[in-house]
């Protein structure tokens, strides 16, 4: 649904709700009791009016942004966001994240790095908040050693909700750099302990295949951990349908775009034994 349609639908719904709210006491209680009712309950209507005004201000102040998103005109969106974020210095989390994601859609990893440098000066806290976007940009840009350093430095500094993904990407970067034992240690820990089914599944899959094959001295250990991880994921998620739902939810995140092939392979390995 288009942003304009959402705006119209929400506005009509809110107006109708306020009209019903005003008229209902009048019909049920009569004019005199209705006046008494609103003498004590007027703050509720005031809150709704403020909400309606705030929603309109938000929509119209971001109308150009919504229009470009609807059109998926990424070059124009980048120019628009660069003017707001870089030229005007509005380094909000929402805008920085959207600009970084837009750069990645255009495969412009150098621009993501430039944005990261500017953000680190203006609002350094946003680097950790958007660690997955800035870190995966290094992987997509083939700066694997840079990705290793980036993710390693943030394993303990990012918010708790991001730590397992940061650890996973750290292990993935190690794997890409052919540091198989180090990658194996990261993936083993995640396969054993992660409560996120996708993270545990991906970790177990890489342990069973790429890492076990290239680490003969620990092959048996890695395969055992991978088998245990697979059973743990299947027990937690149940059917393959649930796995696909989790993957579909994750696919909305731009940092996971590079993992689509691996998530498909992991699903087959989990449920079809491939």
Image (cartoon, helix red, strand yellow):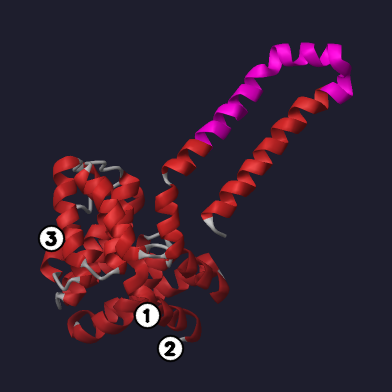
| Main secondary structure type of the part rendered in magenta | helix
- The residue where tag 1 is placed is 261
Q: Where residue 54 sits: x, y (%)? A: 50, 33
Q: 80 or 44: which is nearer to us?
A: 80
Quarter occupied by residue 35: top right
Q: Residues within 10 Å of mark 3 (few under 14, many from 20)?
A: few
Q: Secondary structure at mark 1?
A: helix
Quarter occupied by residue 196: bottom left
Q: Secondary structure at mark 2?
A: loop
Region in magenta: 26-55
Q: Where residue 27 sits: x, y (%)? A: 87, 25
Above/below status of 72 relative to 160: below
Quarter containing the N terminus: bottom right
- Mark 3 or 1: in front is 1
Q: 111 or 70: which is nearer to us?
A: 70
Which residue shows up at 35% across the image and 47% down it?
Answer: 94
State the mark number for residue 61. Answer: none
Residue 165 shows up from this direction: no
Q: Where residue 10 sits: x, y (%)? A: 62, 45
């Amino acid at each position: 649904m288009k942003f304009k349609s959402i705006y119209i639908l929400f506005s009509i719904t809110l107006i109708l709700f306020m009209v019903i709210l005003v008229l209902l006491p009048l019909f049920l209680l009569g004019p005199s009791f209705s006046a008494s009712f609103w003498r004590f309950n007027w703050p509720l209507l005031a809150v709704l009016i403020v909400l309606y005004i705030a929603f309109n201000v938000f929509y119209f102040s971001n109308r150009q942004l919504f229009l470009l998103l609807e059109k998926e005109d990424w070059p124009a969106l980048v120019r628009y966001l660069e003017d707001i974020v870089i030229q005007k210095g509005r380094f909000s989390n929402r805008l920085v994240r959207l600009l970084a994601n837009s750069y990645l859609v255009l495969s412009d990893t150098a621009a993501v790095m430039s944005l990261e440098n500017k953000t680190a000066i203006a609002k350094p806290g946003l680097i950790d908040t958007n660690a997955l976007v800035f870190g995966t940009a290094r992987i997509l840009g083939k700066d694997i050693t840079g990705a290793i350093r980036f993710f390693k430095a943030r394993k303990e500094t990012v918010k708790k909700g991001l730590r397992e993904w940061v650890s996973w990407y750290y292990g993935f970067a190690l794997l890409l750099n052919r540091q198989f034992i180090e990658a194996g240690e990261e993936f083993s820990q995640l396969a054993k302990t992660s409560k996120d089914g996708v993270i545990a599944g991906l970790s177990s899959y890489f342990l069973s295949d790429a890492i076990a094959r290239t680490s003969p001295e620990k092959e048996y250990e890695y395969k055992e951990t991978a088998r245990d991880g697979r059973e743990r994921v299947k027990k937690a998620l149940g059917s393959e349908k649930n796995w696909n739902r989790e993957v579909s939810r994750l696919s909305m995140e731009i940092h996971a775009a590079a993992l689509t092939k691996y998530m498909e392979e992991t699903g087959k390995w989990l449920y079809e034994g491939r």
